[in-house]
Image: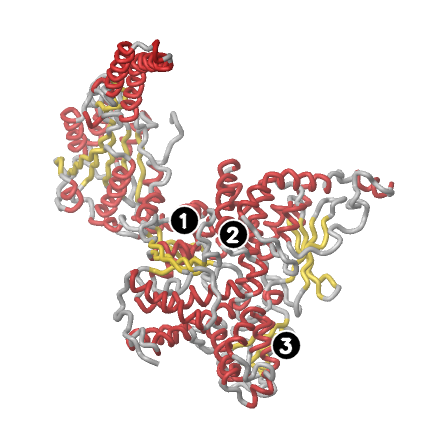
Amino acid sequence: MTRRKPIATGSDWNFEILDRFEREIARLADEYRLDTYPNQIEVITTEQMMDAYASVGMPVGYHHWSFGKQFLAVEQAYRRGQMGLAYELVINSDPCIAYLMEENTLMMQVLVMAHACYGHNSFFKGNYLFRTWTDASSIIDYLVFARKYIAECEERHGVTAVEQLLDACHALQNYGVDRYKRPSPISAAEEARRQKEREAYLQAQVNTLWRTIPGQAQTDVLAGGHDEEDPLGLHAGGRYPAEPQENLLYFIEKNAPLLAPWQREVVRIVRKLAQYFYPQRQTQVMNEGWATFWHYTLMNRLYEEGLVDEGLILEFLQSHTAVVNQPDFDSPWYNGINPYALGFAIFSDLKRICEAPTEEDRQWFPDTAGSDWRETLEFAMKNFKDESFIQQFLSPKVIRDLKLFMVVDDDQEEMLEVSAIHDERGYRRIREALATQYALSVREPNIQVYSADIRGDRSLTLRHVQDSRRPLARSVYPVIRHLHQLWGFPVRLESLEGDEVVRRYHWPLPDEARQEQA
Amino acid sequence: MTYFIDRRANAKHKSAVNRQRFLDRYRTHIKRSVEEAVNRRSITDMERGEKVSIPSRDISEPVFQHGPGGKRSIVAPGNKEFTEGDRLRRPGGGGGGGGAGEGGASDQGEGMDEFAFTLSREEFLDFVFDGLELPHLERKNLVDLDEVRPVRAGVSKEGVPARINIVRSMREAQARRIAMRAPIRRALREAQEALEVEERKDPVLRNPARINELREEIERLEKRLESVPFIDTYDLRYNNLVNQPQPSSKAVMFCIMDVSGSMTQAHKDIAKRFFLLLYLFLERNYEKVELVFVRHHTAAKEVDEEEFFYSRETGGTIVSSALTLVDEIIADRYPPGQWNLYVAQASDGDNWDDDSVTCRDLLLKSLMPRLQYFTYVEITPHAHQALWEEYETVAAEFPARFAMRQIVEAGDIYPVFRELFKRRAAGG
């Protein structure tokens, strides 16, 4: 390969240089058949970056104190030098928005372009979760709509009222997603158009549901028979909802008896945004691993072609090594498994398995070993999420390299037990356990709406199905308090182990409830 | 396809609203931190921001989480010596480390008991002086005030070019153009119609002289139409300003400090800090506040700020000397009709025995009727002396406008200051 002259040397940059690098990266990415959205690269200042960070990467967000808290935390950490700012902050939108910070060196700018504009970008466009759950072309519009709507609500109903509502919704936002149903894409124009009629419609629906006045209901049930007023049989006995509902916010939006139409709309906004971020929560390892794999590949290609000099590539390697560093479990810097390290290791090893498989690889990955690496990686990127990706592609070599081991912590045993290590007997169990560790259903307690007592005291009952006897953290009380605020009537939460209820939580607390009745 | 956008020039502080909301929400916490900071800091230090900590549990955003307990398996990297089946003691005795269960949106709270952040200087001072005001800042009579402020008073035909009102001028010009052109247009239209009629006639019947005449007429009218000026001097309109007498909120604050021999260095420090707080407060809350510094031992002297706080002098104590001087200065420079007068005095309570009575009389007869507010802080851990007792009679006489408090140690300064300058309900 003929070596060309470096595009630039030193650490200073200007737009012309960035543009030339971008073109070269684009050419190489094209060679690797990376399919991306168009890029919109924004050069911003440190402070703007902190702003962007604070709003969890939403370029336009509604106002809420929690984002202010986030900002202060970021600012503090940055000032103390505890964190480098946004290696990459990239927004899953079409065009894909990435930020370059003005104070970064040339190397960092090139690295971020490779990492975010081609790595993450192609992941957003390719991965099935993102394709299913988010609509990149309309997210910005929707954010604008949400911001405007919430600002209007604040004007009409007061900042405090909106803030309390948002607090309550945020507490439940992880339970604002239909995990098994494909959602309809969100679009601002559509939302705004439909929003008005939805308000009226929603309210009408809720009214039907709650028409029966408690007390009177009993006689209705006794009377039985077909009721013209109640064609759905909602009030004719049985449990409501008939099936447990996993999407708490959706259930609230549609069924909470006392919410005003605008409050339902706010619940909906939080729910829609939670849905937008839902794939990101499930593909952290893959997404970072993929982007890191590509920045590593692209930067090395730039160097091979002579487009960057030794100084730059050394600076890059230093930065890259820091990013994929995985401290050991007993290191003071250990803070869980580094998704960059794990993801990069798996993707790199996958490439190795394709190009230079060993006997072990052939045994473990009969279909993959020796296949075209580019196609295999593309397949892996497109069709998995962290849980299934690890289950499928975590190779014995990566387990050995990272020296992974598994500890079982059972509160009924006095000691912890090392149940598997990186050896022949342990590979599968470690892989299994690590995959489970990334399963959202295991990371978050499984809580569903079990019943709403629409004929009685209107209380709402949730059920928590315990996973390996793991109880809920104490944060359960503040959360059900928020839920109570949304629902407007008593809220119960039952923890189930098997079919047996092992714990019950109430809000309002029982004695308070008694006082209220007195 | 890629494009670069340089957003560096865009507005910063996009999060300002969110930041403010956060501060508002945790007002009470922040106020407590600010209070502690004010007491801890040296006075020269008052002009910077402050680090504030809030217990994390108070600001956590709760979500459903797994608690400790039950059975779970953890995969971790970096095995060195373990083999399968090894049994280990639980670290820390608890049910596994706390960190692993911590999912959710925020990651900065992990393992930290306090959420710490830094207030900017502005925010800090906002909190320091939150809810305080100068008491009884009355609007003085308009009659004897010569203070004026130019205010807008409509639009006039005369003025200087700098005050030209473009929109109104152009509107005038347009109206004038329409008015001036209308008769010409009408004549023109008539002439054109006449010409048309003439030209349509049978060639035999045409009157060439008439046609020429009409053509000339049209030409003349068109020229006249063009010569109507687009804008003319009498179209011009100017924003009119008139001088309006202004109700004044001018205030003058007299700071009186005892620097006699009985005041120890610690006393002086406390007094200095009290005044400095006052000084910051005034500079911040009121645009037009003058400060007069009077220090006294046996004789009083008006000094500048620098000398007031930082030079040393000793001697006996005659408080009335300072009050007399203030009285003179008021008579001399600050006619009570135009100025709101405030006096803040700091002393250790020592005074010549018979002087305290003089002070009381001076206050009752001469000063208090003219003052808006008089604060007295006595810096002493000991029992009160004659001066305090005499002042108590003054306080009884003017309960709304005379306030006195005791400061024992530096920690009392801020609470006392807040109490003295607490915002009072209207009419109080």
> Residue B363, relative to residue B265: is it above or below?
above
- Residue B96 location in percent, x, y? 55, 71
- Which residue corresponds to the image point at 75% horizontal and 64% vertical from the top-left? A499
Q: Nearer the viewer, residue B413 or B118?
A: B118
- Which residue corresponds to the image point at 16% horizontal and 41% vertical from the top-left? B305
Q: Chain for mark 2? A: A
- Which residue corresponds to the image point at 71% horizontal and 65% vertical from the top-left? A497
Q: Nearer the viewer, residue B25 or A9?
A: A9
For the residues labelled 3 and 2, the Cα–Cα distance comes to 52 Å
Q: Answer with mark 3 or mark 2, whichever residue precedes in sequence.
A: 2
- Residue position marked by numbered label 1 in the rendering: B19
Q: Nearer the viewer, residue B80 or B369?
A: B80
User: Which amino acid type corresponds to the residue marked 2 in the rendered image?
Assistant: Ser
Identify the mark at residue A413; answer none if there is no mark.
3
> Counting other residues with Cα less than 10 Å from the Cα at mark 3, is it few (<14), some (14-19), or many (20 or more)?
few
Residue B245 visible somewhere in the drawing: no
> Residue A518, relative to residue A354: is it above or below?
above
- Which residue corresponds to the image point at 54% horizontal and 63% vertical from the top-left? A281
- Residue position marked by numbered label 2 in the rendering: A138
Q: Chain for mark 3? A: A
